[in-house]
Amino acid sequence: MRPFSPEDILVAIPESDFSGLAVIDWEAWRPRWAFNWGTKDIYRQHSRALVRGQHPDWPAPRVEATARDQFQEAAKAWMAGTLKLGEAMRPRGLWGFYGFPDCYNYDFLSPNYTGQCPPGIGAQNDQLGWLWGQSRALYPSIYMPAELEGTGKGQMYVRHRVGEAFRMAMSVGDPSLPVLPYAQIFYDKTNRFLPLDELEHSLGESAAQGAAGVVLWVSWENTKTKESCQAIKEYVDTTLGPFILNMTSGALLCSQALCSGHGRCARRPSHPEALLILNPASFSIQLTRGGRPLTLQGALSLEDQMQMAVDFQCRCYRGWKGARCEQQGM
């Protein structure tokens, strides 16, 4: 495992004033010993073997504890060091690791599935405070597993994955830390597009919790042919584009109406189904031909604003405070 070097960052991000997303996609192993199951268990096996070779007379429990501690300290040094290097060289970048934090809420087949992170996961994530504190953004994955298609469980799955990221931001005392989930327009590892209700369950759920945005990822497997690219264009023109215009407009208008334009609307816990979707009685989206932009027509009614105030509260941008983010100051 070679540490990142300044040359790596200069090659990847040559612009000295870069201010975009700086995402490190590292999936070989996980920084918590307990999370390295399945194919990643080989790292635990080799860690034990290393300690056992150095101390052949040690009992198994001591070998296990030492191997765990050494592994986790090395993981911390590598990951935190990588973030520090990136931030030193490109200080305006939103540095973070793809897929962190994770919720590991994959027990879809359980008849009592709630989407909540399994017992013990939250406590393990709490031990990664050094990672959340060093990150300049959090990038949880909300790729929709194919097993969830048609189950009605997608929103529960996404809700707790995004919610865990916000919980980690709060745990390090930085509620304004940007959360930018990674999402796809297909069910994961398939060529089946997400229907409108699943866009609401993924992109819409993220926006309703106050995400700073969403990173849309498309695998090269879904873009290998002219036909697949044309299908994506049709989906963007007819389904994804209108939905994103609706959702982002709802988020912007809510920010202006409730948060003085200085914060994001975040759903109140008492209204878990609320989304930042515009009222169709107040707004319409006009499809256009010839590749021209979609147009949004309408305005928030007094009733719309009152409903937003019932469903949402403000999460202020850094440097603003107050119930309506109307006051400057940390």
Image: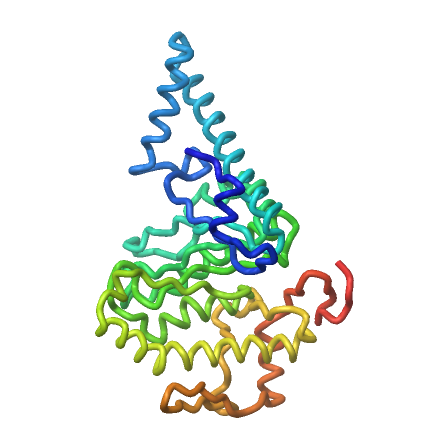
315, 236: nearer the viewer = 236
User: Where residue 260 appears, x then y in whole percent?
Assistant: 69, 75
Quadrant in which the N terminus is drawn: top left
Q: Is residue 305 visible?
A: yes
The residue located at (40%, 7%) in the rendering is 57
In percent of width and height, residue 272 lies at: 50, 67
Q: Is residue 66 above or below residue 160?
A: above
Please tell me whether residue 270 is drawn above or below residue 74 in the rendered image: below
Numbered disc total: 0
Residue 116 is left or right of residue 80, and the answer is left
* 201, above or below 5, in the image: below
Please give the name of the residue rendered at 36% of the width and 59% of the height, measured from the top-left corner: 143
The residue positioned 63% from the left and 59% from the top of the image is 176
| 28 relative position to 275: left or right | left
Report the coloring of the rendering. Answer: rainbow
Residue at the far top: name it.
57
Residue 309 position in % (x across, y down): 62, 77
Expressed as whole percent of the image width and height from the top left, the position of residue 209 reads 53, 65
Residue sitting nearer the eye, 60 or 7 = 7
Is 164 in front, or is 12?
Answer: 12
Report the quarter where the C terminus lies. Answer: bottom right
Asked whether residue 100 appears in the rendered view, the answer is no
Q: Quadrant of residue 221?
A: bottom left
Residue at the spot 38% in from the left edge and 76% down from the top edge? 240
Horizontally, is 65 left or right of 53 in the view?
A: right
